[in-house]
Image: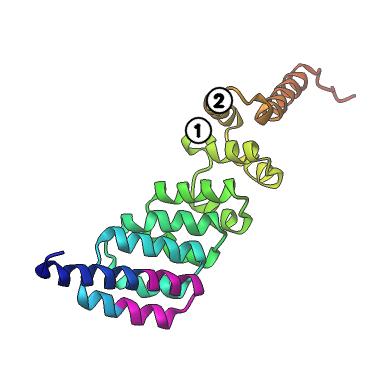
Amino acid sequence: MNAQDLPDTLSFLTNRSSYAAMRNCIRKKDVEGFKRVFDQIRKQTPLDDNTHQDLLQLAANRGSLACFQALQPYVAEPSLYSEALNSAARNGHLDLVQHIEPLMDEYSKEEALWMAVLYDQRGVVDFLLPLCNPKNQSSKFLGAAVFQGHQELVELLYPLSTPKDALRYLKRKTPDQPEKWEMLEQRILREQLKAVTSQNRPSKRSKI
């Protein structure tokens, strides 16, 4: 190693150690420790968007709203919050979902709802569902609930969705796993038969 390379090497090692320390503070939800290390490293080297996004996502994943809020003044680009919202939704951290949601567009909210359905996070689903259209994206939210076997969410989403679209979505995505969507197909067929039977039933005439 050349002598002139030594300062760069030391700087790299220092930053790497500080970065690990920041992540460790987030894992422990030690917001004061995080702020201290974050301010120290920020004075030495500006952090790029990828680093900010990684730290935001870790804070959301661990459910550390305080660490998340400490990062926000340094993150102006809304797109950097999308993965954090997904992480919070997937892990059921409702306080973080409620905090991030106002920053997000409709598509990002729907992706977070999909994550919450996949991982059976009922509290997050209840919060995001009124903010989204369950019929969007081929009713894939119902499809996810059916595929994962989350029956409570199936019953919640079924009347709000287009079940035929959800069935087509599942058949397209998992053609080799009919056991995942046969119950939905049978339910749709039963309801169709019931509707036809009801239409063909003669109406009762009132007696004079």
How far across and how far down the image is residue 108, in percent?
41, 50
Residue plotted at (52% across, 28% down) = 173
Question: Magenta residues?
Answer: 20-38
Tell which of 195 and 7 is nearer to you. 7
Q: Nearer the viewer, residue 99 or 43?
A: 43
- Which one is nearer the viewer's eye here, 63 or 204? 63
27 drawn magenta: yes
Q: Vertically, is 124 above or below 203?
A: below
Q: Quadrant of the rendered structure where residue 21 is?
A: bottom left
Query: Is label 2 in a helix, a strand or a loop?
Result: helix
The amino acid on which the numbered mark 1 sits, given as a three-letter code, is Ser
Residue 12 placement, left or right of 36: left
Label 1: which secondary element = helix
Asked whether the viewer can see residue 46, the reply is no
Read off the residue under disc 1.
138
Q: Residues within 10 Å of mark 2 (few under 14, many from 20)?
A: some
Q: Is residue 128 above or below residue 1?
A: above
**Do the CB atoms of the residues marked 2 and 1 lie less than 8 Å apart?**
yes
Number of the label disc, if any, that sits on residue 154: none
Name the dominant secondary structure of the magenta segment. helix
* Marks 2 and 1, how far apart at CA: 8 Å
* Residue beneath disc 2: 168
Which quadrant would residue 43 be assigned to in this image?
bottom left
